[in-house]
Image (cartoon, rainbow, N blue to C red):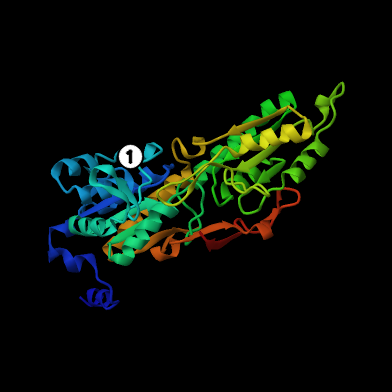
Amino acid sequence: MANEEEQRSDGRIHFEDRLDEGPALKKIAVLTGGGDCPGLNNAIKQIVKSALGKFDVAGITEGWLGAIQISLRPDSRTMNTYTTHLTEEAVRRVDREGGTMLMTSRENPFKYTDAELNLLNADVSDAVLKRLNDLYYAIVVIGGEDTLGAAGKLAQKGLRVIGVPKTIDKDLCGTQYTLGFDTALNVANSGLRQLRSSAGSHGMVFFVEIMGRRAGHLTYHAGMASNVHYMTIPEVETDLDGLFKLIHERKPARYPGYHRDGRRYTMVAVAEGTRIKGIGEILKDRKLDQHGNPVLGDVTEYIVKEYIARTGDRLARSMALRYLPRSGEPSAQDSIRGIKAGKKALDLILRAEFGRMVSITLEGADDVPLADVIGRIRVLDAQVCYDSDNFRPVIGNKFFHEREIAK
């Protein structure tokens, strides 16, 4: 009894103290939103395993879209469409796969459009808040800055929610690592290394596009790991004239036996959100998604056209890795981090510490307020770790040189 009294003296509301408060306390739900990535299924499986004997677990499919649908259309047909029962058997094999078994979307409960319900960029967050709190004791939301940003705003309104960080961009505040980053880094590194064979065989310049809208973590670290010649990141405007001059200077003229020259080809890693000096981001159009982000265009295609036009060298190619780095089964690190994050999320629910996000650190799993991710992102500290004149990393003693900025 003494130990129990000491446990309750911490001032927290514990799950065991609230078992008699109604049937909603017996069920929790999980959803995944934004871009898929390896490690999500590992987190889902661990949440279900950790909940055995404590909660039934429901999966809300298609991210915030599913949550919105069951809130605006609270009928059995919609519930059957957008929710699934996550039993131990249902998740038994999912950790061997990439992606998310619950599917995903980029919908936003604060800006939702539904022609059938005459909604145009409508704030339906109050309906979502009430419905989810009525149905479930707690919600675990696994997502990136947009998905967890919405979760953080709903937490401020009273949603009982726990966040788990995932994004191959690794741009979330409050966490050292995000699910998916390690796998994406390994795939991007492998892709850059493999493309060297074609670039070297033809004496070409390869501009390789890697995902990363506002933060260059993936391009920077994949480029460093594969030892590319140059890289461009979103944190610093790219002067194409300066970049092309360096490429031209290192590329030897063709002569008999020039293939013995180690400079016969050039590899450039390009973040998709690279800002061109005097132009900015390369956009597909001016339309914004539900979270206010413009649709990016093909930056490497633009750079290659400019390179050929300015240098006359037609031996240049663009290659976009696109979805490859975030597809396929998770790396060992993302599998482990997914498991630890899932267990930590359930621990927070048991302690009724809502409005928190699991923080994945070098030491393990901690937690921070979800409010920390609203309206802010973590980017490279380019003044410390990037040589903008030579488009190369500055090698320091820290693994990550980062800073937080307003979104």
Q: Is residue 26 visible?
A: yes
Residue 214: x and y in percent read: 55, 51
Residue 139: x and y in percent read: 28, 56
The residue where tag 1 is placed is: 101
Tell whether 307 sits left or right of 354. right
Residue situated in front as seen by the camera: 139 or 338: 139
Tell whether 29 sits left or right of 23. right
- Residue 383 falls in image quadrant: bottom right
* Identity of the residue drawn at 51% across and 49% down: 169
Tell whether 337 sits left or right of 94. right
Tell whether 19 sits left or right of 252. left
Reply above or below: 83 against 51. Answer: above
Reply above or below: 228 against 361. Answer: above
- Looking at the rendering, in which quadrant would you find the N terminus? bottom left
Residue at the far top in the pictured view: 256
* Identity of the residue drawn at 29% across and 41% down: 91
Residue 104: x and y in percent read: 35, 42
Please tell me how many numbered marks the rendered image carries: 1
Residue 300: x and y in percent read: 62, 37
**Badge 1 element:** loop
Residue at the far right in the pictured view: 256
Q: Is residue 48 visible?
A: no
Residue situated in front as seen by the camera: 62 or 398: 62
Residue situated in front as seen by the camera: 114 or 326: 114
* Identity of the residue drawn at 65% across and 57% down: 382
What type is the residue that disc 1 sits on?
Answer: Met
